[in-house]
Amino acid sequence: MLRVHGLARVSTCCLSPGAAPCPAISTPRTRTAARRGLRWRAVGSTSGYATSCDKLLFRQLFEKESSTYTYLLADVSRPDKPAVLIDPVDKTVDRDLSLLKELGLKLIYAINTHVHADHVTGTGLIKGKVPGVKSVISKASNARADCHITAGEKIHFGDLFLEVRATPGHTQGCVTYVTGDGPGQPQPRMAFTGDALLIRGCGRTDFQGGSSLQLYQSVYSQIFTLPKDTLVYPAHDYKGFTVSSVGEEIIYNPRFSKDEKTFKSIMENLNLSYPKMIDVALPANMVCGLQDLSAKPAEAASN
């Protein structure tokens, strides 16, 4: 079951009327030096960053062919250590599941920030290998999944959660997942921005219903309003960076540091080539990355 805070309703978030409800959604933290002699630390684009939370276990994983980051978060304070994967890739599913097993984690959600065009999501393969895992994507994406989320909902795993923020513009269904705010949640906060905001860049806006003006407004209203020390974790990086911060991107992002008119001009004159994986990735990702593509995207969206 998907618990929705701030709204007088509880959403079962299920794909079809006969499907079992999604389990309560939760998030992870890392162990601090006081409890385990360890403190998670990530090297950013210009300086080091650290987040403190004695329950969150966090791993940033990389798929080199599409330069995609997959993120693993788990609440290790719970006996079952519930975990989520953000933006898994089909080619690295076995690696990710092996890591989960080694760490003794229980995967409950495989989450996508949007319908990707440069790789096939691993959610379909994961569901086939790990019974009980639920796939999650935004309702606006019109893609197949067990759970369709909307802005304002919270995905809980253990005592932690991810807040859903709608950030369309790269695609109509893009969302950003932000770790919770409040006691017991990771500080500084962490924003998993998909392709909406990259480190010193952003995703293209010339296909999949993209809009440069919508993307600009999304980033400024939903990401740049977060505390400036919020850590930014994108879906891709092509220059070797791993993490940034909201404060850095406001100042140094060569696109978003410009005014809206200039940003629109930049995006309209990128002259990018046709994505080499789009004809394979889009149809597959519309049906949760299932390898059997007999189901048409339109049919999947109507289920």
Image (tube, helix red, strand yellow):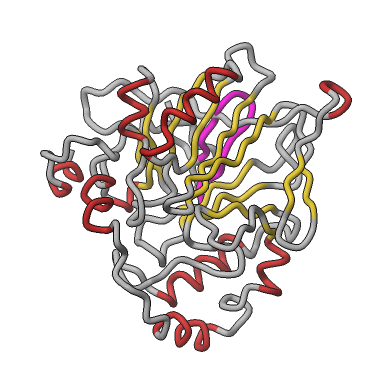
Q: Is residue 43 above or below residue 1?
A: below
- The foreground one among 81 and 94 is 94
The reply, left or right, for residue 45 in relation to residue 128 is: right
Residue 160 shown in magenta: yes
Q: Is residue 234 above or below residue 61?
A: below
Q: Position of residue 289 (x, y in %)?
A: 29, 40
Quadrant assignment, res 121:
top left
Q: Position of residue 269 (x, y in %)?
A: 41, 85
The reply, left or right, for residue 146 in relation to residue 106 is: left
- The foreground one among 69 and 301 is 69
Quarter of the rendering occupied by the N terminus: top left
Q: How many marks?
A: 0
The reply, left or right, for residue 33 in relation to residue 4 is: right
Quadrant assignment, res 271:
bottom left
Q: Position of residue 37 (x, y in %)?
A: 85, 25
Residue that sits furthest to the right in the current view: 34
Q: Which residue does the image show at 37% across and 33% down from the upper left?
A: 135
Q: Which residue does the image show at 54% across and 26% down from the upper left?
A: 83
Q: Is residue 50 above or below residue 223?
A: above
Q: Position of residue 116 (x, y in %)?
A: 36, 53
The span picked out in magenta is 154-165
Q: Which residue does the image show at 41% across and 47% down from the upper left?
A: 150
